[in-house]
Amino acid sequence: MMVEKGKRFYEKKKQKMMERFERFLMIIKSHLKLIFSDSKTEELLVKMQNEYENLYSQLPYLGTRKSSLLFLLIDSTSLLAVMRILEKEGMLLDEIGKLCFDYYESIANTRRSSQNSGKTDITSLLLSKNYLFQKEFIYGQQIYAKESQLKKFPEGYVYEFVEGDGETFDYGVNYLECAVYKFFKEHDAERFIPFICIYDFVMARAAGYGFKRTQTIWNGAPFCDFRYSKNNTTVRAWPPETLPEFKKIKKIKKVDSYL
């Protein structure tokens, strides 16, 4: 029943999601052209589109509630399609990671410009530290965390809200289960997880609030510890192996040479 419901859900949204992916590729294209010829870039874009369509057809159904964080899984799947094709082209993991990082910084700058211009679209809101630290937003995080703990969708997120300590952070979220990690693991793509995770640092740094994380599920920890501080700063997350969460590398032998 759940599988059929998921198929209907994604099929209904497929055209919109494919169009969204095409817009995403137009941004990626500018980064690819710094590395490849124009003709090779166009060839890669077609392959990436086909790869995304294949991955999209396999996405798990997480429901439609805000607590599902479905947009995180879809955005991560977009990048997975890109990373897979680049790896097939012979790019090294650190080269793929740097391209992702540069992409993150470019969209962060775009969103920051939108915010500074007074626009109130969702992308500029997500980059606004005033929005992220409003009482209403924080209360919503508490509600969504409780909803996630019902575990209605086994392939989804499960997380808990953490009250701030009044000194080092304002509030936090512990991700006990991660939909992106599960999906990537299922598709033998765990080696790419670090390049998804550094997104959190880039966005926080661009918005001007403090973000810290000392451990991740990918690294063998029981949960990912996200901590947010309104009046603090965030480190630049490149190279990622300098981050505390990378100091206890436990698995994924394919990444050993990179880290």
Image (cartoon, rainbow, N blue to C red):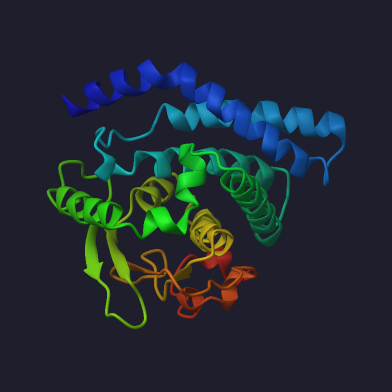
Residue 78 in the image, given as x and y percentages of width and height: 53, 38
Q: In this view, does 190 lie to the left or right of 19?
A: left
Residue 100 in the image, given as x and y percentages of width and height: 63, 52
Task: Residue at the far front: name it.
Answer: 118
Closer to us: 222 or 90: 222
Closer to us: 44 or 102: 102
Residue 210 in the image, given as x and y percentages of width and height: 47, 70
What residue is shown at x 53% (from left), y 23% (from top)? 18
Closer to us: 137 or 86: 137
Q: Is residue 102 left or right of residue 226?
A: right
Task: Residue at the far bottom: name it.
Answer: 167
What residue is shown at x 21% (from left), y 49% (from top)? 144
Identify whether 246 is placed above or below 79: below
What residue is shown at x 45% (from left), y 69% (from top)? 211
Q: Can residue 188 be seen in this view?
A: no
Closer to us: 167 or 45: 167
Rendering quarter of residue 74: top left
Identify whether 232 is placed above or below 199: below
Quarter that holds the N terminus:
top left
Task: Residue at the far right: name it.
Answer: 37
Residue 103 in the image, given as x and y percentages of width and height: 66, 49
What residue is shown at x 36% (from left), y 60% (from top)? 133
Q: Can residue 181 be seen in this view?
A: yes
Count of numbered marks? 0
Rendering quarter of residue 141: bottom left
Quarter that holds the C terminus:
bottom right
Identify whether 138 is placed above or below 85: below
